[in-house]
Structures are given as structure tokens and as C-alpha cells.
Amino acid sequence: MNKTLKYIFASLLVITIGLGSFAGGFVTGHLASVEGLPFLDADQVFIPVPTVSPEQQASTPEEIQDLFTPFWEAWNLVHNNYVDQPVDDVALMRGAISGMLQALGDEHSSYMDPEGYAQANDSLEGEYEGIGAYVDTTTEYLTITSPMPGSPAEDAGLKPGDQVMAIDGEDMTGLPGEAVRLKIIGPAGTTVHLTVKREGENDLLEFVITREKIEVQSASGEMLEHEIAYVQVATFGTNTTPELVATLEDLMAQNPKGIILDLRNNGGGFLQTSVEVTSQFVDEGVVLYEQYGSGERTTFEVISGGLATDENIPMVVLINEGSASASEIVAGALQDLGRAELVGVTSYGKGSVQNWIPLSGDNGAVRITIAKWLTPNERTIHQVGLTPEHVVEITDEDRLADRDPQLEKAVEVLLEMMGQ
């Protein structure tokens, strides 16, 4: 990042801090004017506004020099007056970028520091070290979107919707979701103590979870009774499409009479991968529309050559409250195109598209919402989700008894479609 932008972004954070402190003064003190200056509390000292240097002014594009004058003033105030010197310019710069993204007011646009960006990429590449859970960092408290199948998070009993209130006894109130997430991940073999708030529970729940090396198998499958092919897609990452193709090659060679695609607790991933997955089950049509703020849109069409496109082989898709983003693209497309019926409960409801754009100098990345996506029938699911044709819930009693009524219903629906 060049020096000018570094100064600008750092100043953004400083202004935010300064304004917060100034507002606090109005709340906690009484102001009166003496020769144009307010009375100050005992712990306050009046400091005149610093002059912006000619170098700082010249380094700012002329058309925005007036706009950025407060940036330089705040920058100079911090560097000239803050008690603990020297200040960490890199930390200020990264904090300023984070504040700038937060100022957009979009829950899915955010800054990822280098460690967070690396971890996010690792999970989509197929492995990382942690507890194995997809999370929503945009909520007041970090929220579990879905535990990964077979992960320490799932084995411990974490559920979609669980909110992380404390980690190792430390209150997470007010901490950014990304900072909370980074406290949860860690080396395999170490433990983390999560204090969780769960809807419907009066008391907070406690979980001690041993971190593991999480190897995410994107796609797997097996043949069930009644000649039904069961396919599970756990994420939409780099390895998803080749793993799905290999799974379908094996299953379709066994001449299945029906197909179940399980997208439960799949927190999403790459948009392009969702198009590739959908294309394995339909031979033509629109997968989704990407709608931009300008009114323009991009249409994503089915890619020809799918292995399970024969509509004489009926299909059911399993979804739940942990099915989000790319999972909803696939399920919504297969539902709208008439290729499959949905079984389960209403999905998570994330209907926007983000680009992850790395910043120069190994300074992480920004995640920016660039568009909203629509299903082939131009439905938006943002904060609404997809509604299954067959609503089936899984109760705590079902989990304790290791029952899966959603899968049982999917088989039942398929048998009806197959005329059995």
C-alpha cells in the first residue's frame, strides 16, 4: 500500500476514535464557554488543532484535500500527543480499513487481516486447524452457522444459531466477529472453552473442545437402499467439483433410481463452484442472476456435460438452517428449474455475493459485497431463505437417538417419485 493511502486509512480510524471520545464528553460533562473554550474535566487537557504539513497536503489529491484535512489533523494529533509512543502505524492503518468497511453498513463487507485471510482461504482449500465450524462474523456475537460433519464442533454438540458469549472465560461483548473467530482457531491438540447462548435455553452452555486438523472432504456419497444415490456436499471450495465428479462417476455407474443431494450445514464458498455443482444435475438453464447496484446483471448459465442430468432419475435436496450462500444458490436453482424438491427446514438466507480482494504488502484483504443474487425465477432469499416443499425438523430427541427424520423423509419422497 502506498504511503498516501496508508496515511488516509490510518486517519480514518483516528477520526472515529476522536469523535467517540468527543461524544463521550458531551454525555458525561457539562460544557460552558469561556473565551470560546469549554470547561475541561480534571483529566482533560486542551490541545490546539495541529497544522497540516505541506507534504501531507500535497500528497492528497487536490480534489479531496478539504475532505481529508481532518485526517491529517487527527493523524498528527495521535503521533504528537498519544501517551504511548511510538504508535503502531500498521495497526492504525489496518484498523482504519476495518472501520471504513464497517461504515458501509453492510454486514457482509469487512476487512480480513493477514492471519484471518489465510485461515479463510485454508478452509476452502480443504484443511485447517480449529474446531470445524462455519460462523457468521457479522452478528453482535459470533454465531455458529453450521458445524462441519464429523468435526470437533459437531461432536461437542454445537448447533446452528449458537452465539459465542465468552472464550476461555473472556467476555466477547463488543469484540469484532473476526477477532472472536481468530480466538477460536488454533493448533491441533489444544483446547478452547466456549460459553454459548442458545435460543430456547435459559442458561448459558459450556463447551470444552479440543482443536484438530480439519480436513474438509468437499463431496462424498454412497448407495442407499431402494437404489438411491446419496451425495453430500460439505463446502464449495477448490476441491469440490473434482471430488463431486469422482463421487458421481462411482454412483451413476450403479444405475441409481433416485438421487439425494445433502446440503445441510454447508456454509457456502465460491460462487463459481456453486454453478459447477448445479451443472452436474441439470443440462440447461439459468443457475442464478447476479444483480448489481447499477441495475445491471450477470447471468450464470448451466455448464454442459453434467453426470446426473437425466430427469428420469428424480432428485431431492436436503437443506437446513445451516445451508447458506452457495448452498442456497444450488438448492434454489434446482428447485426453480423443477429438477428437485427440497426437504428439511428453511435455509439460512444469505443472498449476496462478496469479492475477496487481497491488499498489497501482505496486509490481508477486503471482502466487499458486489451484488445480490437471484434464483432462476428471480427470487431473492436474503434474510428469508429457501422454504422446502417438505418441512421436517430434527429434534434434540432425534439427535440423541441418532435418528435422521429429514433423510427418512427424503427417501420417502423419492420413492413416491419413483412410483414405489
Image: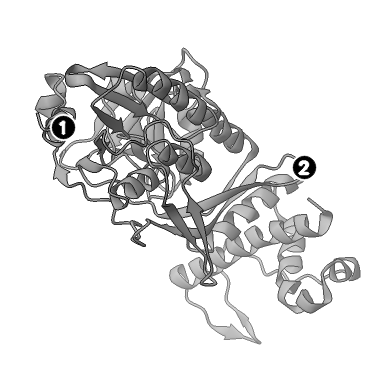
Q: Quadrant of residue 316?
A: top left
**Residue at screen point 53% across, 83% down:** 32
Q: Quadrant of residue 76?
A: bottom right
In the image, residue 388 above or below residue 253: below
Q: Position of residue 178 (x, y in %)?
A: 50, 42
Judged from the image, the secondary structure of the residue bearing numbered disc 2 is loop
Judged from the image, the secondary structure of the residue bearing numbered disc 1 is loop
Q: CA distance from mark 1 to mark 2?
A: 57 Å
Which residue is identified by label 2? Answer: 361
Q: Position of residue 382 (x, y in %)?
A: 35, 57
Sequence-wise, the earlier of marks 1 and 2 is 2
Q: Residues within 10 Å of mark 2 (few under 14, many from 20)?
A: few
Residue 244 as seen in the image, left or right of residue 365:
left
87, 339: nearer the viewer: 339
**Residue at screen point 36% across, 18% down:** 253
Which disc, if any, is residue 360?
Answer: none
**Residue at screen point 16% across, 32% down:** 418
Q: Position of residue 97 (x, y in %)?
A: 64, 54
Identified by mark 1, the residue type is Met
Residue 49 as seen in the image, left or right of residue 294:
right
Q: Residues within 10 Å of mark 1 (few under 14, many from 20)?
A: some
In the image, residue 219 above or below residue 24: above
Residue 211 as seen in the image, left or right of residue 381:
right
Identified by mark 2, the residue type is Gly
Which residue is identified by label 1? Answer: 418
Q: Is residue 243 visible?
A: yes
